[in-house]
Image: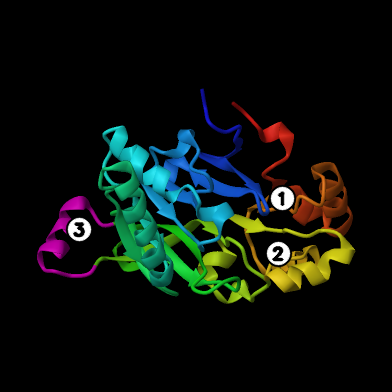
Amino acid sequence: MPSHNLARIKIDDYDIVGYSVAGEETVVAVPQLDICFDIGKAPDQLISINNVLLTHGHMDHAAGIAYYLSHRKFCGQKPGTVLASENILTQVDEIIKSWGKLDGNRIPANFVAMKDGDEYFIKPNLFVRAFATKHSKGSLGFTVIETKKKLKEEYLGLASHEIVALKKKNIAIDYPVETPIATYLGDTSYMNFSKYDFIANSKFLIAECTFVADEHTDRALAGDHMHIDDFIKMLNELNNQYVIITHLSQRTYIVEAKKILKEKLSPALFQKSILLMDRKHHLR
């Protein structure tokens, strides 16, 4: 039996699978990209995903990291890869070692320290780029980017044997093209994310909007979280095709949140925005 009742949203060829309630648990995966943004309490359904992109170390986002890594070993899978800032990984490593002592077995893990601007290749044509966010020490967001090579305009229309001949002469006939697919902000207060082209033009943006009530602006500021007013400002600066809204406060019911979003977002923004925890997306 699955350990969690996860939401599942289908966007073109991708599934966004997860659970996110502020202060309780946040875990969001895209199986086709083999990545899991944060790990929450480590749902059994997501243990097979090889790469965890850990935005920060708060319990509701990171508590399941030891179970994720240990259960992969139990299931005969290769060690999971965890991307996070160095200060977070230092603490996670201590946790893993302590759990290994309690369990009586070493828990294998592949830790990759990341900082603003760092990149890590998941596959030859797929990589993760980290960027700084404003939440806690070392907090990061991540964008998953597909890279392809495109033939230079001056060589379009050449026959295959002509292309081969140019390659043999070590002539650069193509150039790399980056296509940002998924961006996950994690927990953060407002920043000018539009300065990053790869965030602004990511196919889908997974972003927190923790507080939607007018009277909760102070709470957003105190915790470095997003209030709906800043959330709307941010969306108007970006060009994402889809927006997955996460991390809603337990102080606001989904029905109420949807009503407020519809009132405050422009029709165009509301049309492309999806609340992850809307019950209609939940599947067993």
The answer to whether residue 180 is seen in the rendering is: yes
Question: Callout 3 environment at 10 Å: few (<14), some (14 to 19), or many (20+)?
Answer: some
* Residue marked by disc 3: 163
Q: Circle 3 — which element?
A: helix
Q: Amino acid at mark 1?
A: Ser
Q: Circle 1 — which element?
A: strand
Which of 154/101 is in front?
Answer: 101
**Is 138 rendered above or below residue 21?**
below
Q: Which residue shows up at 76% across the image and 48% down it?
A: 271
**Mark carried by residue 235:** 2
The residue range painted magenta reads: 158-172
Q: Are marks 2 and 1 in contact (CB under 8 Å)?
A: yes
Q: Residue farthest to the top?
A: 1
Q: Which residue shows up at 60% across the image and 74% down it?
A: 134
**Position of 199 compared to 171: left or right?**
right
Sequence-wise first label, 3 or 1 = 3
**Is 264 rendered above or below residue 259?**
below
The alpha-carbon separation of the residues under discs 3 and 2 comes to 43 Å
The alpha-carbon separation of the residues under discs 2 and 1 comes to 10 Å
The answer to whether residue 34 is seen in the rendering is: no
Q: Circle 2 — which element?
A: helix
* Residue marked by disc 1: 273
Residue 101: x, y in percent?
Answer: 30, 49
Based on the displayed image, in which of its 4 quarters is residue 264 positioned? bottom right
Q: Amino acid at mark 2?
A: Leu
Residue 215: x, y in percent?
Answer: 89, 65
Question: Callout 1 environment at 10 Å: few (<14), some (14 to 19), or many (20+)?
Answer: many
Q: Amino acid at mark 3?
A: Ile
Question: Callout 2 environment at 10 Å: few (<14), some (14 to 19), or many (20+)?
Answer: some
Q: Which residue shows up at 64% across the image and 58% down it?
A: 207
